[in-house]
Image: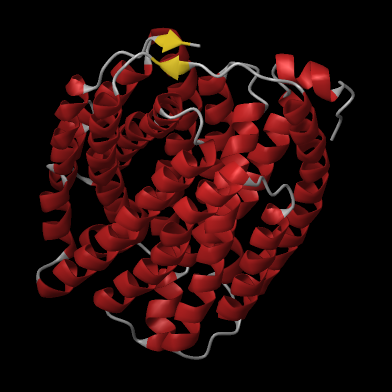
Amino acid sequence: MQTEDSPQENIQKTVFPILFSIAFAHLINDLLQAVIPASYPILKQNFHLNFTQIGLITLCYQLAASILQPLVGLYTDKKPQPFSQIFAMFFSLIGIIFLAYANSFSTILIAVVFIGIGSSIFHPEASRISFLASGGKRGLAQSIFQLGGNLGTAIGPLLVALIVVPNNQQHIVWFAIAAVLGLIILSKIAVWYTAHIKLRSAKKTLIELPDISKRKVVFSVAILMVILFSKFFYSASISSYFTFYLIEKFHLSVRDAQLHLVLYLTSAAFGTLIGGPLGDKFGRKYVIWFSILGVAPFALLLPYADLFWTSVLSVIIGTILSSAFPAILVYAQELLPKKLGMVSGLFYGFAFGMGGLGSALLGNLADHTSIYYVYQICSYLPLIGIIALFLPNLKKKN
């Protein structure tokens, strides 16, 4: 990782080596997270789990990943912790080892909680680093950061299909190598972050505040939360149950179903990459509105499509839907620019919480009805995105 520019120069312009490094660390973090749902078919078979239990695994992981994030962000807003992400990756490493050698349902829950804690510590500070290294190109920086995470989410199921599925659950331990690589990268980023913090504390930096009332700020945050509910509840139906849907409806093998999931997740990575720059160019409000409401026609068609069109629609849905989150997060950071860590933690935490709650509720619904019925119900969720029209256009004041 090259960091030839001085810290003072780094404040003034986009620091791409740091952005790509933190994005790669995000890739590793989210790859380790993706191992959990990608392993569901194996765990379901090994431990004779029902969909409700699978939903509970996701809920435990997502709660561990969500509840702590706003608290971590609030604390690091006051006292930045450059080396905290190293501890985050260490927690994830422990979780992966536990998951590989889990011999009971309770051990699985403990393993995913460790991975969730690692994620909750990682995201607030990592998102702040991408913001500080952006040089003002906040949408682009957030997209690069999110792209890393989405690529990790896409690669995870592919590696599970290639490494774990043909062998056994214990082969999950190979993912510990990625965690060790993450520890090395994050230690180097922490050195840059420490120098950057010292320079910013010595030099006053101008903070741009939104030219709207506090009441509108609260109202806007509430709208964003509702939009996130719609996005991540629907996303939970794909990330946790898409493989089961394909296996049940089209009688695919586990590996083939996983490859279809990878196709969806890869399209989501592409959508993330374009979402931030589009928000910089056209306005984040319009990207948010289009990416949530715009996916509705395709989501409504998905439960009635054959295998070919299911694949096509999943790619369209993944691309459009994933373009929302970089725009949502940067919009929220611009609403509350003095609370970057808290905002990042709150939105990541809420997103994970909604994903976990959605997975648990949808799993229970699938047990009592069918996976097909779950997709019929979830297809209406993107219609909630129409409320993005009520978001104000942000003007800045110093």
Would you say residue 301 is visible in this rendering? no
At a point 68% along the width and 39% down the height, the residue shown is 22
Q: Describe residue 368's horizontal placement relative to residue 252 as left or right.
A: left
**Can you give x and y, in whole percent of width and height, for residue 384 in the image?**
15, 36
Rendered image quadrant of residue 117: bottom right
| Vertical order, 58 against 192 (above or below) | below
Quadrant location of the N terminus?
A: top right
| Vertical order, 238 against 145 (above or below) | below
Residue situated in front as seen by the camera: 292 or 45: 292
At a point 65% along the width and 28% down the height, the residue shown is 132
At a point 52% along the width and 28% down the height, the residue shown is 143
Would you say residue 38 is visible in this rendering? yes
| Vertical order, 314 against 35 (above or below) | above
Residue situated in front as seen by the camera: 168 or 183: 183
Q: Describe residue 324's horizontal placement relative to residue 104 as left or right.
A: left
Residue situated in front as seen by the camera: 318 or 2: 2
Residue situated in front as seen by the camera: 161 or 232: 232
Rendered image quadrant of residue 195: top right
**Can you give x and y, in whole percent of width and height, for residue 26 in the image?**
61, 45
Q: Describe residue 57's horizontal placement relative to residue 7 as left or right.
A: left
